[in-house]
Image (cartoon, coloured by chain):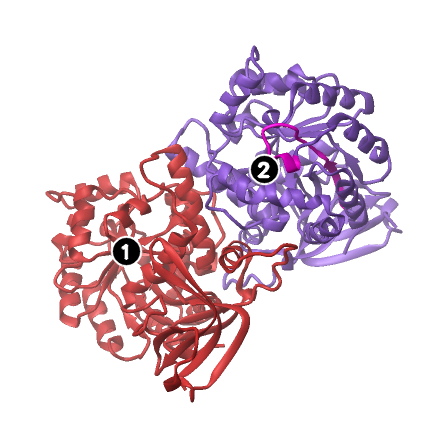
Chain colours: A red, B purple
Amino acid sequence: MRSFVLKGHILHSRDKDRIDIFENHYLVCQEGICRGIFGQLPQQYSDLPLEDFGDKLVIPGMSDLHIHASQFSYRGLGMDMELLQWLEHHAFPEERKYEDLTYADRAYGQFVSHIRRSETTRACVFATIHREATELLMEKMEDSGLVSYIGKVNMNRNCPDFISEKDAIADTRLWLQETAGKWENTKPILTPRFIPSCTDDVLEGLGKLSREFDVPVQSHLSENLSEIRWVSELVPGTKNYGDAYAKFDLFGKDGQKCLMSHCVYSDDDELQTMKENGVVIAHCPESNMNVASGVAPIDRYLELGLQVGLSTDVAGGSHESMFRAMIHAIQSSKLRWRLLDQNVKFLSFDKAFYLATRGGGAFFGKVGAFDDGYEFDAVVLDDANLDHPQQITTHERLERVVYLGDERNIVGKYVRGRKLF
Amino acid sequence: MRSFVLKGHILHSRDKDRIDIFENHYLVCQEGICRGIFGQLPQQYSDLPLEDFGDKLVIPGMSDLHIHASQFSYRGLGMDMELLQWLEHHAFPEERKYEDLTYADRAYGQFVSHIRRSETTRACVFATIHREATELLMEKMEDSGLVSYIGKVNMNRNCPDFISEKDAIADTRLWLQETAGKWENTKPILTPRFIPSCTDDVLEGLGKLSREFDVPVQSHLSENLSEIRWVSELVPGTKNYGDAYAKFDLFGKDGQKCLMSHCVYSDDDELQTMKENGVVIAHCPESNMNVASGVAPIDRYLELGLQVGLSTDVAGGSHESMFRAMIHAIQSSKLRWRLLDQNVKFLSFDKAFYLATRGGGAFFGKVGAFDDGYEFDAVVLDDANLDHPQQITTHERLERVVYLGDERNIVGKYVRGRKLF
């Protein structure tokens, strides 16, 4: 059932600078793997079932590299607060509730139902410190058909007592034993909240668990300047924030998959290490606006050859839509260009699309494009309700559905060749 | 039919700093005029028909102080271009089409149908240079039940020949003769595109027409720095851009209603004159991001006592939603605060709501709130589809529907006491 042909207008990123467009083409999926885009369907695929999407757009599924499932309940609230006020008023009291599995079931159910019908096919997710609720979320994500890394959060200092872990490493080890390898599409990812929230022994323990279980790592990095100063006090003798993660073997290197969110203020040394270690950057433009952190110089990072993807960062971001994240990435890059530094170009639409698809997809492997050999994640878009009196091009149709569309425009979704709807 | 009572959760701005919330209250409309908010319905209104909206939210209608009806067709396109490229590629070729009334009928029909079902009850609108198409738009807006000022654009220099007026003043006079006083809800407003697009004699003629017909004026002001330098060359001997309008009697004063969009870079003298002359500022946050102009220091303008409203500025802005404009106002003010100037506070949610309702409504008179004596514009919001597992307050429900909602959440709309749906 995972072998078929789609017909329609196929769009994907050739590279970071350009979207390739194939009108009225065929897109082949064979056992969950993309076999490429064809103007004429090759003989060898002529027996596969074909679905003709006519004038609709078919794009790669999007990878949301940073989203807090446990914050989804208060998305769009407190969006005019500063970070600390927002953490105290919303984040911490809400996260506490996930010790109650009945609450977690309801809240995570809502999260999964929204993200399932969005343009996102893959996600890297923060849960809370609660092992059982995190496993419940993992079950739900597996049932959704999406592909995800899910993190049980680690946190045992600089937070209210009611969400501070008592035995972080033992509990995390148990969680890994229970979840690593259990599901086809859902995997654990080690998730220290950030350096200030974990004691040295926890960070060290997590580094070891990462190697022992061969699981990836995600966290926050260089989001704002006072946080960076704080980290340098907490982990003295390190060159920068990234170096503090590296000290505990949580910063890529030797095949460890590592994902770091924000990187608004990463210095040259930190960037160089990230490049050498293959650390992936999760750009969170809306969140960086909402909590007034700033704007990461993404075009510069791309020019340096760093690997960058995009994220909604709900609930620092208000909405699970990666289309909205693309808009925020472009808009905030323009204000950065205007107000701060004209040496870093603002992002084009094609670059934002790259970040949301091929750029972030790379964290999951061969994902985010329709190249031969890539895993087959696709989203079908119907933009017929976005009326216009004039002729517009297929590229313009894509731009318009990103700016004006919502989940109503998503009429088909495939993950690893499995049709979700 | 314009006298009735609504029941529900009533919210409006007390002042620029605070939203007042009245749960399960009564809102009285008598012959199109609001008679206030009551916990118990006064005896004198007990015979009026009552509509009970239960748990829904009732807010004042919003005033979009700046929107280009003729650019609605390409909303959400070219959003990563710079201003001049965008004007040449989209704005000018598209505006030319409105010499064809068949095209104008289709395009303006789409514009009116969208804005009618949005949260906007009042708008100040730019059309094109074409008199007949502008009158067609005015007919459609009148039929919609919304209240608007509609401007036939004036432009006779620094633009392609195909959209340059040949006899601007005579044509504008004819337009005023045909439209001033013709409709209940739709009025003409003089609309020089901006100083660079009008010769001195046209600007002078428009100033005189404004007095002769007692019609208001709208235009663009101090949107970006190169534009400001250009204006100082085009109208030598003036202190600033605003002074150039003033030279032609197009800058408020002596009872002339005047509305200026953008004001990103207005200097102290310009601001002082605007305050003295009662010029209203139309803040266009999304457009100012999209064309990389910058961010107007709105909190400072409010502190100075200037009159400020909010606008979508489609198609510099991508969407007709004033909710989105509120979000953009908050987000861009945060980046301005972070990247440029921490002396100007970023906007709170309550302030953004004020701008969208009471602030902009003031351009239309007693509009944008539920005070006794105000014209009755109201929007009813059903947020039941915005699921959440926890209890949230009525204020939080409003914030959430602004961040997450769309036209599906707008289930009732009243303008001057007339129910549109």
Residue A323 in the figure: left or right of residue A247: right
Q: Is residue B161 magenta?
A: yes
Tell if the residue under mark 1 belongs to the same chain as the one under mark 2: no
Badge 2: chain ID: B
Q: Is residue A167 visible?
A: no
How far across and how far down the image is residue A267, in percent?
A: 21, 41
Residue A399 in the figure: left or right of residue A141: right
- Residue positioned most to the top: B237
Identify the residue shown where x is 63% and y is 50%.
B73
Q: Is residue B329 magenta?
A: no
Identify the residue shown where x is 30% and y is 79%.
A183
Q: Which residue is mark 2?
A: B18
Badge 1: chain ID: A
Spatial separation of the CA atoms under disc 1 and disc 2: 35 Å
- Which amino acid lies under the numbered mark 2 shown in the image of this protein? Arg
Q: Which residues are magenta?
A: B146-163
How far across and how far down the image is residue B383, in percent?
A: 61, 59
Q: Which residue is mark 1?
A: A193
Q: Is residue B316 visible?
A: yes
Image quarter of residue B252: top right
Q: Nearer the viewer, residue A204 or A308?
A: A308
- Residue positioned most to the front: B161
Q: Nearer the viewer, residue B327 or B158?
A: B158
Q: Nearer the viewer, residue A72 or A216?
A: A216
Q: Dot 2: within a 10 Å radius of its alpha carbon, few (fewer than 14), some, or many (20 or more) residues?
A: some
Quadrant of the image for the C terminus of chain B? bottom right
